[in-house]
Amino acid sequence: MNRILRWVLLGLLGMGAAVIGIEVWRGTQTAPVSESAEVPVIALPDLDGRQRDSAEWQGRVVLVNFWATWCAPCVREVPELVAAQRRWGDQGLQVVGIALDQGEPVHAFAKRMAINYPVLIAGMAGFDLSQGFGNDILSIPFTVVLDRTGRIRHRHLGVVTSAELGQWLPPLLAEPVAPGINRKAE
């Protein structure tokens, strides 16, 4: 291959990598949320095969995290989610993990990491569900925070940090619970 063609190909590869890098960087930013955002219903089996439904967490602030055991950034953020459930669970937070993975690897991982919140198994179909929550580029980790009325208040593509959770969750947890709403913790 001649030198000019090699340099042209390297230049094209470099530009492609730059475009991908910019899109990934943009994707790690918290997206604005429309007040009229329709929230999909979650109905998936948990690690024990029991069907779980989003109505179960009605009246709670729900943090839905789409992840997989094969996703290194997803694995890195799990301790933050475990800590958030421990810290704010009794104040009305419910973290829900939706694994875009198969049951056995997820079960082993959840046990090893001492995950203290429900983990639901969606397999690759979970990407479609995440798209319904606003994950337009179908990448993970992807996190959505719902207020006590079930409205999407935060969307975040990329690893969620304790600082972000500390900024998002307390104001939502301070909102009053409507009468007759079940606040039972997981």
Image: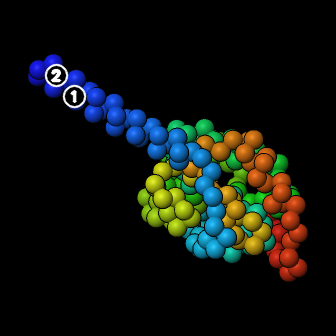
Q: Where in the figure is residue 119, as x and y percent of width and height?
A: 62, 57
User: What residue is drawn where x is 56% and y is 64%?
Assistant: 133
Colour theme: rainbow
Residue at image coords 79%, 46%: 166
- Residue 65 visible within the image: no
Estimate how packed mark 2 is, as few (under 14), some (14 to 19) or many (20 or more) residues with alpha carbons within 10 Å.
few
- Res. 162 in view: yes
Residue 154 % position (x, y)? 67, 58
Apparent side of residue 101 relative to residue 40 in the rendered image (left or right):
left
The residue sitting at the left extreme is 1
The amino acid type of the residue labelled 2 equals: Ile
Above or below for 42 versus 25: below
Q: Is residue 6 above or below residue 155?
A: above
Secondary structure category for the residue under label 1 = helix
Task: Give the amino acid type for the residue marked by disc 1 in the picture.
Answer: Val
Pick the residue in front: 150 or 94: 150
Q: Position of residue 127 (x, y in %)?
A: 47, 60
Q: Is residue 4 left or right of residue 51?
A: left
Q: Tell me the SS state at disc 2.
A: helix
Asked if the residues shown at circle 2 and circle 1 are in contact, with their CB atoms under 8 angstroms apart, the answer is: yes
From the viewer's perspective, is residue 41 above or below residue 111? below
Q: Tell me the tag on residue 4.
A: 2
Which x, y percent locates residue 78? 64, 44
The numbered disc on residue 50 is none
Residue pictured at 47% horizontal, 40% vertical: 22
Q: Which mark is residue 8?
A: 1
